[in-house]
Image (cartoon, rainbow, N blue to C red):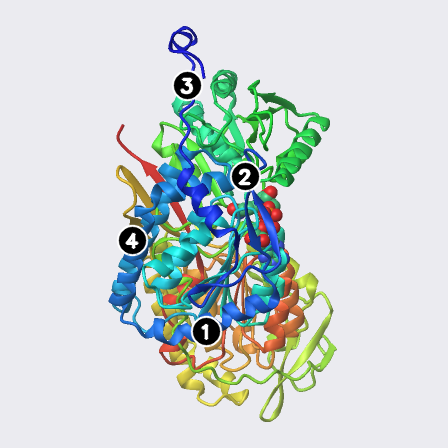
Amino acid sequence: MPSVSEILETMDYGPAPEATGEVAKWLSARGAFGHYIGGRFTEAGETFDVANPATGELLARVTQGTGADVQAAVKAARAALPGWSKLPGHDRARHLYALARHIQKRERFLAVLETLDNGKPIRETRDIDVPLAARHFYHHAGWAEMLEDEFPGRGPVGVCGQIIPWNFPLLMLAWKIAPALAAGNTVVLKPAEYTPLTALAFAEICAEVGLPKGVVNIVTGDGATGAALVAAEVDKIAFTGSTEVGRAIRKATAGSGKKLTLELGGKSPFVVFADADIDGAVEGVVDAIWFNQGQVCCAGSRILVQEGVAREFTERLAARMAKLRVGDPLDKSTDMGAIVDPVQLRRIRDLVARGEAEGAVLHQAECRLPAKGSFFAPGFFTDVAPANIVSEVEIFGPVATLTTFRTPEEAVELANNTRYGLAASIWSENINLALDVASRVRAGVVWVNATNVFDAAAGFGGYRESGFGREGGREGLGEYLADAKIKAKADPAPPPPETAPLREAPGVADPIDRTAKLYVGGAQKRPDSGYSYAVRGKAGVIGLAGLGNRKDIRNAVEAAHKAAGWGKATGHNRAQVLYYLAENLAARAAEFAARLKSAGGPKPAEEVAAAIRRAFWYAAQADKFDGAVHSTKSAHVTLAMPEPFGVMGIVCPTGAPLLGFVSLVLPAIAMGNRVVAVPSQAMPLAATDLYQVFDTSDLPGGVVNIVTGPRDELARTLAAHDDVAAIWYSGDADGTRMVEEESAGNLKVTWSVAHRDWSGPEGQGRSFLTRATQVKNIWVPYGE
Ligand code: NAI
């Protein structure tokens, strides 16, 4: 310890470590931990060691969960479900308030335990992780109170399996457990193997506050335990972690009917314009990439700086980096603590070495790192080629890349040049420019002149390969509520298409039917196969449809991408087109009814009338379905904006060939998506006839593309297509499984749409619009 006169000489910080006595006592009293199942701790089984990453010292031994342990926990959660879900919302709210209070009561204890287990500085656990965890329980206690009023007709999903990572152990637990419990679900949560201790402390809190037994169960273990939970009889899986494991979970749950949310990795852009407050932006980098040792899924790890200020920014950044204090995480003046585990440290070292070997220049602080423990000095790369490994792969450590751009267009292009889409941070004093870029960046969360700001009232989650679903606020709560029940109708699989070369349909009078074309990019196109298939009505063949194949789907997706202007049109513009479409459909109602009649449809005139009304309804919604301004932190506007996915695939039911098609395609385009639709395989003509209606309604070419043919083959191509962002599939169980499996490639959003009485209230509603959009949360701070 330096003397006072030495300190006055050097003006160095003196160490100010947080005391660990209480936590040490707690740990040693428990020895080895079992799981928390059905309201009590089990005997420890086979254990693994949990170490302090800052020292390498053993903290605790924790049980490796077996398949049987997971089964027991799921059984306990299942047994607790009826009681918990039937409690009045107010009673559940009281339990959540009690959890929040107890977290607050043990704030210091939890902060120290988290720091020991994870290696992050005490300043972060004390000021961010633990208070936010408490805030999450308070916020969701409020939702429990209001659930019946705010979400009429919706109830819990059931038993939720929740798997969390090691970077925000207690906070991620709160993000998962608070909304689940508020909505009336029961849970089995598996913390990460590196950081299970605060979850076990939380289990004790559950017991202390008298939470009914089995409502929260904690099973510890590694990926194998996680995989067992995914495979167990749960109704939902919520996962946060790597994209690789997220993809495996998507495949493992395909066709199971389990509801799924994935919050995965990112490679988020941090965009600095020349007119930014440079010091503010430099401080932003500290928060974006050096905060939590860069082990943050939404870390702004790709710094993009406008050329004019690049030099100045880089110099100031290097100067600021040199001042960061790396070391004992328990010291209150430490800025950066330890990397969570030696495995993760090796991973960071390897990636950084490869980045350098591939030609990038590493700037790294010359700080003295502690002799033991897993530490890595903060740094950033310049001269990074786009193909360099560090440009593409998430380092998940305290090292960013820094590249320059010239124009806002280039900034947007670079920002979006990634498979991920979790977050973005944009720095400019020009609100016009900042919001313009915010609207064009493909990310679920955008911070303007800020970074890594979180609050329980705002949704958090990604676009693209960063996963789907939101956590936090109303959006997040929706993920823990079952959809309103509908009466599903059987929809028989269509017979295999009877194919024939094009133009060889005897007795087909109508020239369009005779040529059997697809509708792609606003024009009729011959199918690539050169074949058509017979469409049968009651009295035999009534027409021909093109036999579409993969190539046709690919062409249609390309055409849909070219129609990107539709997504930028105002809601009013889209409404005008949809009104016009409704009117034009009405003008030809008799023709469509005759077509449906020839196909043997049960109530042709009614089906057409309902389709017309539907078009008016979605026209009306086009400029009304909108977002929210969330009540989060003071001096912040947090805008929740529903945005279209971009290109969607829609595979329509066999029955209700006109109304099923219209009921799915119209909400999607009303929200600004472009669609590649596969109409009813048995009766596609009701949909292909619509091309004339589209043409006369000023619907821009490429907004709706129709590819007829074998439903499941076409669905497979759509589901596997990397440029399709979402797919709705109405078909059988095998088809659903196939679509969900194939969608794992780019982690597209899927919806398995049950065939139903499309003419009734279940055929239309805001839920379709919610399904057709993804929410972007934009944070704009104001004031000083
Ligand atoms: P991971 O994805 O392997 O682990 C996250 C959680 O999933 C842990 O609880 C783990 O036990 C569990 N898990 C692992 N395999 C599983 C499986 N097959 N089925 C079910 N659960 C499974 O992440 P890991 O290995 O800890 O970190 C590797 C990389 O993942 C990091 O370097 C980082 O790039 C990324 N990552 C992203 C996070 C985020 O917040 N989005 C958090 C942690 C890691």
Q: Circle 1 sits in a helix, a strand or a loop, which is it?
A: helix
Up-down: is 27 above or below 437?
A: below
Q: Nearer the viewer, residue 720 or 538?
A: 720
Q: Nearer the viewer, residue 549 or 368?
A: 368
Looking at marks 3 and 4 on the same chain, the residue that comes earlier in the sequence is marked by 3
| Structural crowding at the residue carrying mark 2, measured as other residues with C-alpha within 10 Å and reported as few (<14), some (14–19) or many (≥20) | many
Q: Nearer the viewer, residue 566 or 315?
A: 315
Query: Which mark's residue is nearer the viewer, 4 or 2?
Result: 2
Q: Residue at x 31, y 67 (%)?
A: 151
Q: Is mark 3 within 8 Å of ligand 1?
A: no
Left or right: where does residue 57 sit relative to residue 578? right
Q: Circle 4 sits in a helix, a strand or a loop, which is it?
A: helix
Q: Is mark 4 within 8 Å of ligand 1?
A: no
State the separation of the CA atoms marked 4 and 2: 30 Å
Residue 141 placement (x, y as % from top left): 29, 58
Looking at marks 1 and 3 on the same chain, the residue that comes earlier in the sequence is marked by 3
